Structure formats: C-alpha cells, structure tokens
Image: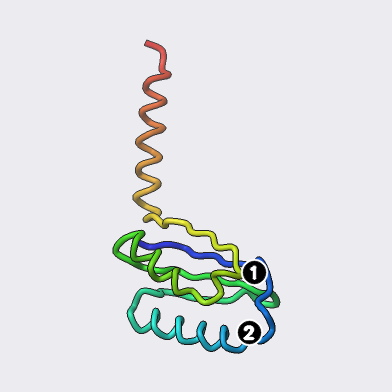
Amino acid sequence: MQFLIVTKPASAPPPEMILPLIDAMSAWITANRASGKAKSLWSFAGTGGGGGVIDVDSHEELDEIMAGFPFGPFSTTEVYALSDLDRSLAASRAVFEGMMKAMAPR
C-alpha cells in the first residue's frame, strides 16, 4: 500500500529545538530509506514542509512510521492512499458503463 504524505508547518518549534529536530529528521529519513519504506521524499523549495511516498503493508504500519516523524507536533499532515491509475480508470469505466446502461431507454 502506497501513501502520499504532505506536511506543512503549523507552528514553529521553540528555537532551542530546531537543530535537534533537524538531526532527528535526518535520522528518520535515513531509517525509512534504508528499510525501503520511503520510496520518495522531498521538501518544498523556498518554504517549509515537504512530503513523500511511503510504501507499507498496512495503514497501522504507516501510523507507526508517522508517529516517529520528528516535526509531527509542529505540522499539518495530509495522507492520501494511492491507487494504480490503470485499475482506477478501469473501475471508473465499469461504473459509468453501468450507469449509461441503466439510463438508456428501454
């Protein structure tokens, strides 16, 4: 299961926490890349926040990973479940074909 994670700053951490948070974030990134769970990670250019694609076996596993996200208490986090595009298009086509048949004059 893949999830798109988008984080944006919600509040500023206390100044004395910024450098330790950056170090903790670097460690979090390293651990999740090494485990193969973080497929892609990025920051937003010129502003705070960022995101990535996390590949996990369950939403509970995602919750465990995000519980360790160092900037979590200072961020707004959005999570989007990702779906295979071809499969989504096929499902949408099937639904609309069914609707069209139901609406057709008899």
Give x and y (percent) for residue 101.
Answer: 37, 23
What is the distance, in whole Å, between disc 2 and disc 1 at their CAs?
A: 13 Å
Q: Is residue 75 left or right of residue 69?
A: right
Q: Residues within 10 Å of mark 2 (few under 14, many from 20)?
A: few
Q: Secondary structure at mark 2?
A: helix
Q: Which residue is mark 2?
A: 18
Q: Is residue 51 left or right of residue 103?
A: right
- Amino acid at the residue labelled 1: Pro
In this figure, which residue is indicated by the disc labeled 1? 9
Q: Earlier in the sequence, mark 2 or mark 1?
A: 1
Decide which of 43, 30 is in the foreground and name it: 30
Kindly identify the residue that appears in the image at 62 percent across and 74 percent down: 44
Q: Is residue 94 above or below residue 7?
A: above
* Residue drawn where x is 36% and y is 74% of the image: 37
Q: Which image quarter is the C terminus in?
A: top left
Locate residue 63, reporting x and y percent: 40, 64
